[in-house]
Amino acid sequence: MDLARFLGRLWARRLLVAVAAGLSCATVVVMTYSISVLPPDIDTKQTSFGVGSAELLVDSEQSLLDTLDADVPSLASRAALVAASARSPAVRNRIARALEIRPTALSLVAFTQTSDAGANAETAAPSFEETGILTVSFVSTRDSPVVTIASSAPTGEAARRLAQAAQVAVLEFGRERARDAVRNQPQLTFSGERPLTAEDRDEARKLARLRRVALRELGAPSGEDVVRSQSLTRPAVTGIFCFGVLCVLILVLDMLLLMRRTTARAG
């Protein structure tokens, strides 16, 4: 009942409602297009930001390139752990120190994809256009021991530096954790009917190297500028919001006029 009454009052003030609709449409147009009077011109607004990428190989201490006995699925699962641990405050602080920014100015994201399709810098990381803050995504895939680092910043060069800082931070963090693990590892003792030979020791060291995880850089970080046309989502939502606010103001104005008339008649 109230809705029908409100719609009736808006219909009675349909001229003002038309003005409100025109102002809302004008807001959408101004937010979407760049309009020039001299010379007359109208172009779609464009936004630009930078994306960067780098890669890390989760490898055994004896490189995958040097042995056929490496357990790739196991290394792939460890890559997911590396990507998840890269969101730690220790990595965030290292990146912030390298770029001389506050840690709170960084957003770190980690996730695992079912395949490496689409794991690129432009799609993996939330864009700087969307978030307004520096963003780094650590992406792993279920069948690959590679961690992709995707960054987003105001410019391509800034995104490249961000990806490089993230790559170095994860490498340093991983090596520090590896040193702690080796330092805290208990000493192994061997027992058997025969004494331990030099060949046994070499084989044991070889197996230990295969089991130990090492992080390696894959190529140099890269960055590029991305230019996109203005999305219609934000202007459309703003236009609808403006129209709703103006309609409420019209109803309030109509109510005030109605109360004034009622008071005048009663007087």
Image: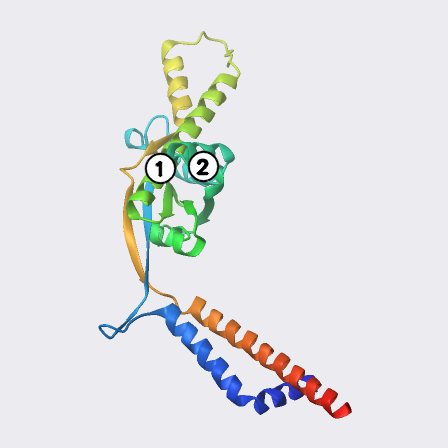
User: Where is residue 252 shown, x and y percent of the image?
Assistant: 63, 79
User: Where is residue 228 shown, x and y percent of the image?
Assistant: 32, 61
Question: Which residue type does callout 1 highlight?
Answer: Leu
Q: Is residue 227 above or below residue 32?
A: above
Q: Are the two marked residues, 2 and 1, in contact with CB atoms closer than 8 angstroms?
A: yes
Q: Residue 13, located in which quarter of the rendered image?
A: bottom right
Q: Quadrant of the N terminus?
A: bottom right
- Residue displayed at 54% across by 89% down: 14
Q: Residue furthest front?
A: 267
Q: Residue furthest top?
A: 195
Question: Which residue type does callout 2 highlight?
Answer: Val
Name the side, left or right, on which 264 lies relative to 28: right
Q: Is residue 98 visible?
A: yes
User: Where is residue 31 shown, x and y percent of the image?
Assistant: 39, 68
User: Where is residue 69 shown, x and y percent of the image?
Assistant: 35, 31
Q: Is residue 146 above or below residue 124?
A: above
Q: Which residue is mark 2?
A: 82
Badge 1: residue crowd in 10 Å (few <14, some 14–19, many ≥20)? many
Badge 2: residue crowd in 10 Å (few <14, some 14–19, many ≥20)? many
Q: Quadrant of the C terminus?
A: bottom right
Element carrying mark 2: helix
Whole-angstrom CA distance, mark 2 to mark 1, is 10 Å
Number of the label disc, if any, that sits on residue 56: 1
Element carrying mark 1: strand
